[in-house]
Amino acid sequence: MKKWWMILGLGLLMSLAFLPSAFAEGTANAPKIDSGDTTFVLLSAALVMIMTPGLALFYGGMVRTKNVLSTIMQSFFIVGLISVQWVLWGYTLAFGPDIGHFVGGLNWLGLAGVGQDPNADYAATIPALAFMIFQAMFAVITPALITGSFAERMRFPAFVVFTLIWATFVYDPVAHWVWGVGGWLHDLGVLDFAGGTVVHILSGVSGLVIALMIGKRKGYGHEVMLPHHLPMTVIGASLLWFGWFGFNAGSALAANGLAASAFVVTNTAAAAATISWVGSEWLYHGKPTILGAASGCVAGLVAITPASGFVGVVPSVIIGLAGGVICFFSVSVLKAKLGYDDALDAFGCHGIGGTWGAIATGLFASKQINPAGADGLFYGNAAQLTTQIIGVAASWAFAAVMTFIIIKVIGLFMQIRSDDSAEVQGLDLSEHGERGYAYQDLITGHPLSASIVGAQAAQEVGIPKTTLG
């Protein structure tokens, strides 16, 4: 009996001797969090977050004085609204386990099961929560971009309901199509590194549909509607340029060479488009403007977004230069000829720029830059261009049809557009009871309305009162 106990004990000691190596082997095969990658992605998420307040300033400076706060409010409020929507149900619809290649399941409702361990399907070296919050900031800024199309004329309650429904039924499904495991465009091979289809085409096309459905601003085409604060717009554009490095480079989801490449081509394309937009308006209108420079940099950033993780530096110059010219003419010529009131050119910059960027990805993508991608037309793979065009067409069609339906349904239950009197007064006062600027009579100290100040200033420079916004 003692012999059997000795044999059993010896066997147990031998198994314990081998246990550490077996445990180490199992640990080595498990996904391991990389602190550098995690830090990089969280900082990138913060950069993308600041883009939406930056967009608020970019748009806010371009509207008239009486609408500056309502315009800023829309972007700022979306940060809160969509951040909550995303953690409750938006994330699982976009990235949850696939249902029919169309949408994610509800497995991660309220972030159930999304924790500090990695999800190897999306990013094996960072916590699942880090990936989730990075993607949340994309979900936040996308509906904020739409607000530029209907600026100065949508009631705040309708805006809130539209934003919530649109994010749920348009953004989340298409994010799954393109980026979700099992999404049909993902499986088809559509390349969209950081959101040319998901962010820019969806927002730009949806904005155009809303602008057409609710009509032009009162006085559009008959009154001068100039930006009231261009320095504010330039500050906003600068924040967008700054934050876009997190937008594109962060989409590598690791602090590696691909992130560095995406960072460089992002800056290069933005710089090239700034030059080409300013050059185009200089030739077309006779003067270069700071508004043109700010718009150009945004156009370049939009155009390079889908391609940023798949193209090299020289193609990024071409994409940026062409993007600046294409977006300039869509804003300055196409809009004027067709007569639609895309107030702050969300469609002209994001819809058109995103379309060009997605197609350009099919031209210039190279597996030398990203082996996980594909070669484009100029690298011997014409099929990739066809695939990109399918992605563009699907995004355009889905955004247009769904936005039309959403606006029609909302219109059955509430008033979408502000009344004429409220629009004349300005949405700052009519919707929010606030003024962006306080004016006082220098002699009496009594407050003056913005319209009175504007009329006095107009008389000094010889502008008729009837042209004032």
Image (spheres, grey):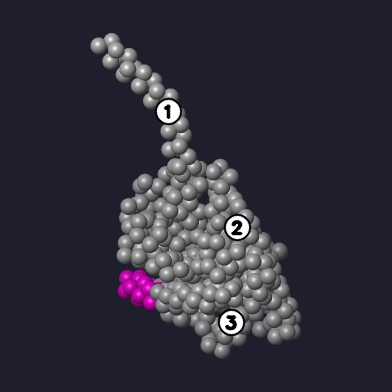
The overriding secondary structure of the stretch rendered in magenta is helix
Decide which of tag 3 and tag 1 comes sooner along the chain. 1
Q: In whole angstroms, how far apart are the C-alphas of marks 2 and 1?
A: 40 Å
What amino acid type is highlighted by mark number 3? Ser
Residue closest to the eye, 45 or 122 = 122
Q: Is residue 294 left or right of residue 27?
A: right
Tell whether position 105 is magenta. Answer: no
User: In the picture shown, does residue 116 fall above or below 336?
Assistant: above
Residue for badge 2: 258
Q: In whole angstroms, how far apart are the C-alphas of marks 2 and 3?
A: 32 Å
Tell whether position 413 is magenta. Answer: yes
Instruction: Say which quadrant the C terminus sits in.
Output: bottom right
Q: Which mark is residue 330?
A: 3
- Position in image of residue 234 (x %, y %): 67, 66
Q: In whole angstroms, how far apart are the C-alphas of marks 3 and 1?
A: 69 Å
- Position in image of residue 111 (x %, y %): 38, 49
Residue for badge 1: 18
